């Protein structure tokens, strides 16, 4: 056994210093870790903020339809997003927002189509048809957008009456949600049946000439308050439910 | 054996908690990443889903429709990785509280909309709304978030690892 007696004091002092140094090192280590964590945290937060801003910019650019080309024969007062049937002097304005893939729209057309035709023929109302595309996610091939775009091509080439005929054909042959829509060839055949023919019509349907216009019309409708279709406005007031009774009652009331 | 009999179940719970946290963390993370990612492909539809609530002014619609999905994905990724779990869980809880309030308000105002929680959204038939199940789901996810706020350290985490149990009274 070595005799430690003479060195005991120095030994204790050395241990105290070592302990102090270890404590300082531990504190320094903790400080550094906290610092690293703070810096990383700020960096992550900043990255998230940047990602959010980039997403807003990119998605805004994707939804920008400022350079959309509108078809001919759109009605006044619809910002080039609607086609009017009936006399512009008619006392009551009925706006009909429909998606060609929407079953409730087809049901409305079947139930109220004749009534609307009669009201138009009698000069009681002007109907503004405003195709929108909100159901692309329920279609394998963006049928809502393609059908509305094809309707715009027909209106552009052959006028509003051809558009109305084409709309009726589209609703009569409406595909089911969740699957493929009518093909471009089928749309072109129906367009011809409605009175719109020629290479230009064919190219307009195939190339989705009015695809941006459909997006713009849909976005405008959404900003105006559309949350679903059919959305029927009588002199600007939406019908609570799209029924013939509600429609005729609202038209009566609007006529005063 | 010197382990007191009474301590044994408590030790079992203490050992299981970090694993329970892992399950909640990964589950919540997957939900956020999926929910956010599904809202990115169709930005116009995302805007319509936000407008359907009729709560946000038009000027805020793009930020909510385009920004929220990215925030959701970020929260989900942090939770999945186990990095900054507590702040991520706080954001997760705040988002869910906000969503729950928005859905409840839509319900109370008699709107017929889909919550758009996982893309989609907008108006639906009055008889196909699912407000109750949407709220129950959001509250369950909120509870998971609160758990992770309280106990952010879990197993299989990159950073916020639970300290392994080592016998002794501190376990």
Image (cartoon, rainbow, N blue to C red):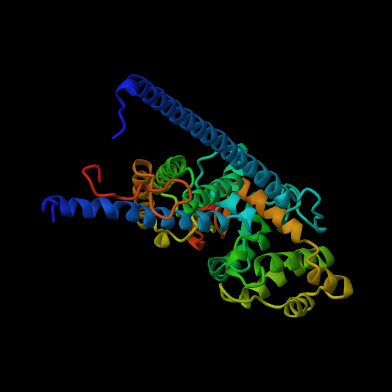
Kindly identify the residue that appears in the image at 51 percent across and 56 percent down. Answer: B35
**Relative depth, front residue between B31 and B67:** B31
The residue lying furthest to the right in this view is A199
Total marks drawn? 0
Residue A253 in sight in this render: no
**Relative depth, front residue between A188 and A36:** A36
Kindly identify the residue that appears in the image at 75 percent across and 53 percent down. Answer: A75
Image quarter of the N terminus of chain A: top left
**Relative depth, front residue between A36 and A26:** A26
Q: Residue B76's spot in the image, x, y percent?
A: 50, 51
Residue B47 in sight in this render: yes
Task: Judge from the rendering whether residue A197 lies leftward or rightward of residue B87; answer left or right.
Answer: right
A37 w.r.t. A248: above or below: above
Q: Residue A62's spot in the image, x, y percent?
A: 72, 52
Task: Judge from the rendering whether residue A134 lies leftward or rightward of residue B107; answer left or right.
Answer: right
Q: Residue A59's spot in the image, x, y percent?
A: 68, 49
The residue lying furthest to the left in this view is B5
Kindly identify the residue that appears in the image at 79 percent across and 70 percent down. Answer: A205
B18 w.r.t. A161: above or below: above
**Relative depth, front residue between A155 and A101:** A101
Task: Judge from the rendering whether residue B72 lies leftward or rightward of residue B94; answer left or right.
Answer: right
A14 w.r.t. B84: above or below: above
Q: Residue A88's spot in the image, x, y percent?
A: 73, 52
């Amino acid at each position: 056994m070595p005799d430690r007696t003479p060195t005991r004091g120095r030994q204790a002092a050395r241990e105290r210093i070592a302990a102090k140094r270890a404590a300082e090192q531990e504190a320094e280590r903790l400080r550094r870790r906290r610092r690293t964590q703070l810096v990383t945290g700020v960096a992550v937060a900043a990255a998230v903020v940047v990602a959010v801003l980039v997403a807003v910019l990119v998605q805004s650019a994707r939804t920008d339809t400022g350079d959309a080309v509108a078809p001919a024969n759109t009605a006044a007062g619809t910002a080039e997003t609607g086609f009017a049937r009936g006399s512009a002097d008619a006392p009551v304005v009925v706006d009909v927002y429909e998606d060609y893939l929407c079953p409730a729209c087809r049901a409305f057309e079947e139930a109220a189509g004749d009534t609307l035709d009669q009201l138009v023929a009698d000069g009681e109302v002007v109907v503004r048809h405003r195709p929108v595309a909100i159901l692309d996610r329920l279609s394998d091939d963006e049928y809502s957008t393609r059908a509305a775009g094809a309707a715009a091509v027909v209106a552009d080439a052959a006028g509003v009456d051809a558009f109305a005929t084409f709309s009726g054909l589209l609703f009569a042959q409406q595909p089911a949600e969740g699957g493929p829509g009518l093909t471009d060839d089928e749309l072109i055949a129906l367009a011809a049946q409605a009175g719109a023919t020629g290479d230009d019509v064919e190219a307009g349907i195939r190339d989705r000439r009015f695809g941006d216009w459909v997006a713009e019309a849909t976005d405008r409708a959404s900003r105006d308050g559309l949350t679903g279709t059919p959305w029927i406005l009588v002199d600007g007031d939406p019908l609570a439910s799209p029924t013939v009774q509600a429609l005729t009652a609202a038209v009566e009331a609007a006529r005063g | 054996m010197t382990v007191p009999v009474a301590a044994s179940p408590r030790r079992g719970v203490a050992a299981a908690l970090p694993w329970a946290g892992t399950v909640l963390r990964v589950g919540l993370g997957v939900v956020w990443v999926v929910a956010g990612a599904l809202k990115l492909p169709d930005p116009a539809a995302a805007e319509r889903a936000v407008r359907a609530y009729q709560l946000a002014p038009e000027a805020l619609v793009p930020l909510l429709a385009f920004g929220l999905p990215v925030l959701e994905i970020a929260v989900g990724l942090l939770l999945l990785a186990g990095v900054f779990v507590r702040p991520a869980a706080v954001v997760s809880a705040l988002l869910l509280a906000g969503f729950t309030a928005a859905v409840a308000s839509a319900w109370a105002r008699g709107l017929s909309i889909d919550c758009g929680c996982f893309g989609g959204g907008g108006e639906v038939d009055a008889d196909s709304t699912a407000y109750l199940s949407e709220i129950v789901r959001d509250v369950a996810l909120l509870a998971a978030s609160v758990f992770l706020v309280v106990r952010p350290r879990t197993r299989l985490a990159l950073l916020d690892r639970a300290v392994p149990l080592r016998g002794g009274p501190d376990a």
